[in-house]
Image (cartoon, helix red, strand yellow):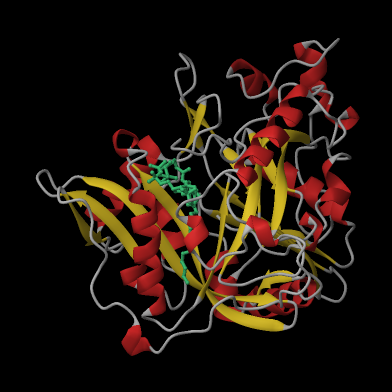
């Protein structure tokens, strides 16, 4: 993967861990985690020819308490923002991907399906569905100009992508307009040609043209400088398939039938009043989530339109459940997950791993552990193979107890043109990017 050899986002369990998930400690120093730490340290020592020129926290400034928190560079007058696109190598041209067009959506889908993020052993590759991509790229107030593609001039084939969507992100007590950058992808045959920096500069230019000067993004690679580093945890729902495809391994002294029994779940949710979220719940869910997210250092500032878009259930894209008190009809708890399958590369029997990703969860009356156990139960009912969660927000309080095991990769969170005094603990982060 270009010059950065750190692993991408975790797509599978850390197979060096004991598969008996409730015995696994997060920071056990396996060879794999030590190897990762060495790689990360090497990345910090190495030159980042592009990132060193950008307004992001630089490695040399880590720990310098004289630097103030907030924007690194002030905005420039809009008239001073470059009006023409950056130059691409002569065989390529910019295209704006119209996500309302079925045809363009299919092209974007195919580019990502064949070239997007893989685990470090190339066993799995994210396979975002078309509906998911449309949902992710058309939130309230989205800018079509931020859906940027690169085509080969001769064939018109789509060979690269970078996208942004607008978001209001609160950092401590300041709400900052930002772009969330995602789906940076360069066709496998065009890697390591420094196309990514041009694409990042082009999306930056187009974001600036909308008078927005900050961005948030995540990556599996270490770049200057993460605001926090998270770990993925995985909860087997279909252990036999996960073992068959090499996602998990049978634990020491475990048989298949003991493993299946270990991960067995009740047939239906146990919490009275647990039901699917509906349109009429948007105001109550917005109040619940806003209040909950206010405790984290970095979190989205959702309004009702955002909640309707990001959390109202959409088939095969996002699922949301809440607890309505049977007595008072008050909405007291909420949980959600999004659907992101991965292609299984080179397995005879299975082609897709169906994964649910924990999204935003709030507990006020139902214990979080019970709420998330109900989320696991509905995910199992819906035939997901695995339920994934980052160690953000309060997730650490249920991961081990609900038999999640640690993943093999880390996810680093970044802000562009915004400095934080110190890195955050993952539990101080209230933001989940797709
Ligand atoms: S994260 C998902 C990224 N995608 C993948 O992992 C899919 C598979 N990989 C690829 O398609 C390519 O390997 C990519 C790099 C496209 C990733 N984020 O062109 P190159 C730096 C940022 O020769 P390639 C996501 O989508 C690298 O350090 N920079 O490399 C969020 C080096 O710079 P430097 C990255 O391998 C994206 C330079 O690129 C990443 O052909 C957020 C090498 O370029 C990465 N994931 O292509 C983007 N990987 O020399 C930033 C490598 O300095 C947004 N690099 O080390 C910033 C905010 C912008 C908006 C601001 C508004 C105000």
The quadrant of the rendering that contains the C terminus is bottom right
Which of 237 and 169 lies nearest the eye of the viewer?
Answer: 169
Residue 373 in view (yes/no): yes
Residue 419 horizontal/vertical position (percent): 66, 71
Query: Which quadrant of the structure image shows residue 300?
Result: bottom right
Q: How many marks?
A: 0
Which of 110 and 224 lies nearest the eye of the viewer?
Answer: 224
Residue drawn at x 77%, y 76% is: 294
Which of 316 and 159 lies nearest the eye of the viewer?
Answer: 159
Residue drawn at x 30%, y 77% is: 82
Residue 278 horizontal/vertical position (percent): 61, 68
Image position of 120 (left or right of 83): right
Query: Which quadrant of the structure image shows residue 362?
Result: bottom right
Image position of 107 with respect to 393: above or below: above
Image position of 153 with respect to 243: above or below: below
Residue extending farthest left: 154
Residue 195 horizontal/vertical position (percent): 33, 49
Residue 370 horizontal/vertical position (percent): 86, 50
Image position of 91 (left or right of 17): left
Residue 236 in view (yes/no): no
Image position of 102 (left or right of 115): left
Query: Which quadrant of the structure image shows residue 62?
Result: bottom right
Residue drawn at x 68%, y 62% is: 61
Residue drawn at x 19%, y 45% is: 157
């Amino acid at each position: 993967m270009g010059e950065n050899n750190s692993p991408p986002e975790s797509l599978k369990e850390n197979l060096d861990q004991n598969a008996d998930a409730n015995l696994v400690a997060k920071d056990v120093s396996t060879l794999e985690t030590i190897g990762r730490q060495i790689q990360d340290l090497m990345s910090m020592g190495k030159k980042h020819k592009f990132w060193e020129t950008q307004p992001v926290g630089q490695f040399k400034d880590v720990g310098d308490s004289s630097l103030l928190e907030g924007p690194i560079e002030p905005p420039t007058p809009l008239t001073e923002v470059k009006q023409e696109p950056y130059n691409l190598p002569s065989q390529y041209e910019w295209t704006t991907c119209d996500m309302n067009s079925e045809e363009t959506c299919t092209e974007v889908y195919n580019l990502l399906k064949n070239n997007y993020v893989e685990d470090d052993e190339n066993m799995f590759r994210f396979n975002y569905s078309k509906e998911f991509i449309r949902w992710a790229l058309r939130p309230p107030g989205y800018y079509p100009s931020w859906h940027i593609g690169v085509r080969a001039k001769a064939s018109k084939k789509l060979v690269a992508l970078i996208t942004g969507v607008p978001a209001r992100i609160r950092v401590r007590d300041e709400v900052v307009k930002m772009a969330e950058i995602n789906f940076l992808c360069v066709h496998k045959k065009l890697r390591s040609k420094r196309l990514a920096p041009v694409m990042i500069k082009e999306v930056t230019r187009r974001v600036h043209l909308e008078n927005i000067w900050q961005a948030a993004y995540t990556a599996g690679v270490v770049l200057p400088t993460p605001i926090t580093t998270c770990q993925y945890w995985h909860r087997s729902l279909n252990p036999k398939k996960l073992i068959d495809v090499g996602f998990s391994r049978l634990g020491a002294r475990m048989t298949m039938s003991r493993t299946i029994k270990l991960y067995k779940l009740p047939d239906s949710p146990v919490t009275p009043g647990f039901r699917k979220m509906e349109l009429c719940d948007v105001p109550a869910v917005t109040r619940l989530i806003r209040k909950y997210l206010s405790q984290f250092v970095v979190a989205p500032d959702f309004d009702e339109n955002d909640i309707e878009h990001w959390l109202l259930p959409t088939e095969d894209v996002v699922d949301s459940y809440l607890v309505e008190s049977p007595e008072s009809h008050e909405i007291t708890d909420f949980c959600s997950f999004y659907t992101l399958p991965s292609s299984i590369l080179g397995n005879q029997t299975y082609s897709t791993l169906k994964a649910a990703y924990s999204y935003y969860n709030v507990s006020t009356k139902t214990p979080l552990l019970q709420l998330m156990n109900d989320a696991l139960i509905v995910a199992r009912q819906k035939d997901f193979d695995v339920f994934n969660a980052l160690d953000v927000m309060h997730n650490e309080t249920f991961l081990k107890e609900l038999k999640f095991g640690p993943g093999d990769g880390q996810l680093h969170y970044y802000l562009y043109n915004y400095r934080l005094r110190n890195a955050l603990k993952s539990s101080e982060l209230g933001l989940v990017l797709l």
